[in-house]
């Protein structure tokens, strides 16, 4: 009983606080109105309470109807301006400060800002699907950032809201998912989802905040089923993270999607030009050796029987389809970083993987067996595994075969 009374008292206090906040906001709004504007609001408020005669109410209706189009047009334009962000980050941030938009998705009180934006959009839902400069509002959230990695994190933070409202209010075909899968050129180029996942990342004092905001955006999209597991493959997210120019790759970002769908490690990054897998792209000239190590470890974790694909050949054609070359990731890495360094790293990764298993010796023999029997694993894989101690490796392989024949 006491708990019930305390809960009621708590709710009463919350209601009073909310009412005080609303009254304060109303006073602030009225303070910005002219005396005539304040009188109009007062009259409309009294009309809603039926405090006038029918004749007066009729005249009020006529007066309101006569200015309704102009009023709604101005408010709609204001809502549209709120969503159509300037390409210049500094200018966009100045405009947003003037409009009272100062929060990002990682701020505690972000959802209060978001609630206000959502309420305005609900009055004019068609602004979500109206293009300006060839782009929907959701596209403007990241427009121009591909080559200029300066981000307006406040606008990036609004992408989940625009996708949710775009779907809920029926402003896009279902397959566009609230505009999230729309492209600036009607089907060509990157869509919004690809841009916010494969964003350019440059190390500076704001890098951590940028990563935090983008990560929060993905999680919100995933929670609301706007970012789906099948998107990883259909939008080639892992492939784009690895096959695009420098500045895109992030180990944390890559593993987020690989751990969600490990099969992406088996899918070519540029299927239109060949069948090279993600691990092949880790050793291209603009890649750091650490990237090679990260992808080997992920490959061994999910596909040990393929030895993490490090010894699987891949073929790639140039963009003009004239020149073709075929190599394993191991051979690519040796040419780039030196054979001794690469071989030691590969053996260390395999040894660490085996050591973490329930039976390291059995796992080593199983991997060796895969190298012998799997035709997709190049002969250099078997050579690498035998190189350290050929006699011991062959002995363990024979023991492994004997044990499995007995079974």
Image (tube, rainbow, N blue to C red):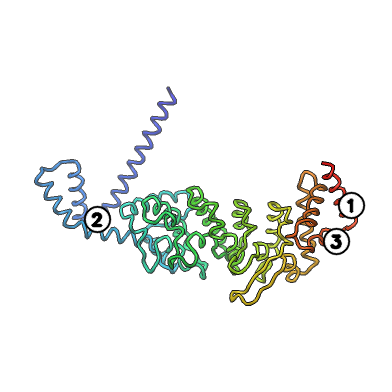
Q: In the structure shown, which secondary structural element does the residue marked by tag 1 occupy?
A: helix
Residue 76, percent from left and from top = 29, 59
Q: Which label sits on residue 387?
A: 3
- Compare marks 1 and 2 and give the one earlier in the sequence: 2
Q: Residues within 10 Å of mark 2 (few under 14, many from 20)?
A: some
Q: In the structure shown, which secondary structural element does the residue marked by tag 3 occupy?
A: helix
Q: Is residue 286 above or below residue 311?
A: below
Q: Residue furthest left?
A: 55
Residue 346, percent from left and from top = 76, 60
**Left or right side of 391 for 86:** left
**Left or right side of 377 for 323:** left
Q: Which label sits on residue 111?
A: none
Q: Mark 2 — residue?
A: 33
Marks 2 and 3, how far apart in space?
A: 83 Å
**Left or right side of 367 for 130:** left
- Dividing the image into 4 quarters, which one contains the N terminus? top left
């Amino acid at each position: 009983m006491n708990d019930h009374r305390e809960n009621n008292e708590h709710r009463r206090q919350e209601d009073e606080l909310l009412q005080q906040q609303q009254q304060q906001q109303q006073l602030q709004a009225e303070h910005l109105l002219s005396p005539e504007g304040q009188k109009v609001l007062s009259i409309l408020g009294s009309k809603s309470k039926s405090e006038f005669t029918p004749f007066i109410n009729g005249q009020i209706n006529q007066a309101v109807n006569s200015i309704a189009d102009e009023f709604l047009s101005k408010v709609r334009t204001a809502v549209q301006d709120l969503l159509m962000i300037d390409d210049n980050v500094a200018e966009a941030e100045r405009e947003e400060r003037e409009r009272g938009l100062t929060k990002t998705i990682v701020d505690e009180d972000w959802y209060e800002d978001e609630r206000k934006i959502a309420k305005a959009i609900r009055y004019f839902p068609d602004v979500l699907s109206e293009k300006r400069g060839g782009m929907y509002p959701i596209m403007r959230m990241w427009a121009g950032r591909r080559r200029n990695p300066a981000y307006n994190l406040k606008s990036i933070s609004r992408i989940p809201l625009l996708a949710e409202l775009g779907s809920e209010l029926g402003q896009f075909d279902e397959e566009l998912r609230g505009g999230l899968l729309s492209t600036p050129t009607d089907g060509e180029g990157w869509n919004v989802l690809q841009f916010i996942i494969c964003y350019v990342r440059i190390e500076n004092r704001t890098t951590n905040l940028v990563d935090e905001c983008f990560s929060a955006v993905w999680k919100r999209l995933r929670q609301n089923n706007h970012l789906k597991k099948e998107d990883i493959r259909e939008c080639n997210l892992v492939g784009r993270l690895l096959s695009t120019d420098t500045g895109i790759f992030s180990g944390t970002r890559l593993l987020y999607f690989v751990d969600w769908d490990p099969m992406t490690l088996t899918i070519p990054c540029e299927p239109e030009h060949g069948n090279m897998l993600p691990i092949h792209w880790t050793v291209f000239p603009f890649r750091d050796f650490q990237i090679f190590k990260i992808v080997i470890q992920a490959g061994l974790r999910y596909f040990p029987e393929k030895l993490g694909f490090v010894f699987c050949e891949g073929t790639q054609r140039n963009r003009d389809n004239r020149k073709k070359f075929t190599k394993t990731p191991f051979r690519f890495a040796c040419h780039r970083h030196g054979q001794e360094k690469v071989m030691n790293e590969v053996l260390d990764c395999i040894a660490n993987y085996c050591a973490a298993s329930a039976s390291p010796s059995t796992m080593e023999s199983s991997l060796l067996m895969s190298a012998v029997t799997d035709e997709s694993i190049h002969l250099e894989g078997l050579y690498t595994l035998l190189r350290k101690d050929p006699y011991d490796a062959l002995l363990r392989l024979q023991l492994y075969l004997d044990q499995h024949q007995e079974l």
